[in-house]
Image (tube, rainbow, N blue to C red):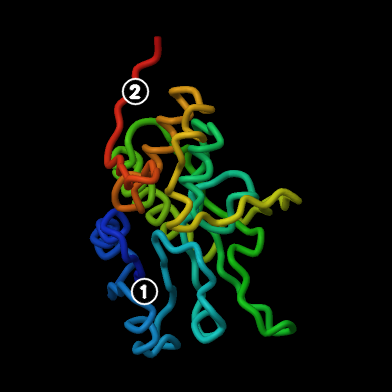
Amino acid sequence: MKVIFWAYRQWGIDVFDSVNRHPRVEAAFLCRTREEVLRLPLEEYDLLLTCGLSEELGTDIVSKIEAIGVHCAELDRYSYGTPLQLQIIDGIKYTKHRIFSFTYDENSNRAHTHNRRYANEVTLDLSGNMSDILQQMTATSKVLFNQFLDEYPNNEWKIWPEEDVVRTKRKPEDSAITKEDLIKMDTEQMYNFFRCLEDPYPNGYIEDEKGCLYVERVKYKRK
């Protein structure tokens, strides 16, 4: 197979070599931006694999090539962006890392993220600092893509249960917290807030009339 691999954060880029060395992959091309993807003759490739992208790819891409990705959430409410941060803030300790499908609906002329379809999955542990979680996601992504490519095109697709609850994608300005809000939280809630915003994400910070105090890394011990 000839595949395109699209990732822009380092934890995702680190998965590329594993995909490139898969026995069924004849050639793999690494892209870091949408512009690089669109410059390729998509119809000449068999698959587009994305690692770390959660936004819609757009019909200009998925109408021309079968596209899949990896998504780090079990519940559908976290399908709308920043799933790691939202799950950690919500106190979720274990979730799923899954292969999902980007599909193209010719009737509506729209591309739908995962379209409620997922294939291979593994358990993802959300404990530790963000560097620990991202290292784990590099490893689990290698497992998921290897499994998917082993089985392709006979993968068993399952339906992702749809929820009425939607957790809205966080924005960089959501990294700010006031001293007044902070004192309403217990220490574990504080820990979850700041650790989910460690590098490479917009760091959490406490703001008052004098300035902003940024928290780049945190450590927590339970009593």
- Quadrant in the picture for the C terminus: top left
The quadrant of the rendering that contains the N terminus is: bottom left
Give the quarter of the image for residue 10: bottom left
Within 10 Å of disc 1 (Cα), the crowding (few <14, some 14-19, many 20+) is: many
Q: Residue furthest top?
A: 223
Is residue 119 rendered to the left or right of residue 160? Answer: left
Where residue 156 sits in the image (x, y, percent)? Answer: 59, 55
Residue 12 % position (x, y): 32, 58
Looking at the image, which residue is at 76% across and 51% down?
A: 164
Q: State the residue position of label 1.
A: 3
Residue 98 falls left or right of residue 22: right
Q: Nearer the viewer, mark 1 or mark 2?
A: 2
* On screen, residue 138 above or below 6: above
Q: Which residue is at the front of the view, 117 or 13?
A: 13
List x then y, in percent, for residue 55.
Answer: 51, 67
Q: Residue 52: horizontal and vertical position, in percent?
A: 40, 59
Residue pictured at 35% horizontal, 84% vertical: 35
- In the image, residue 6 sits, relative to residue 171, either above or below, namely below
Sooner in the amino-acid sequence: mark 1 or mark 2:
1
| Crowd class of label 2 (few under 14; some 14 to 19; many from 20; radius 10 Å) | few
- Residue denoted by label 2: 220
**Three-letter amino acid code at the position of disc 1:** Val
The amino acid beneath tag 2 is Tyr
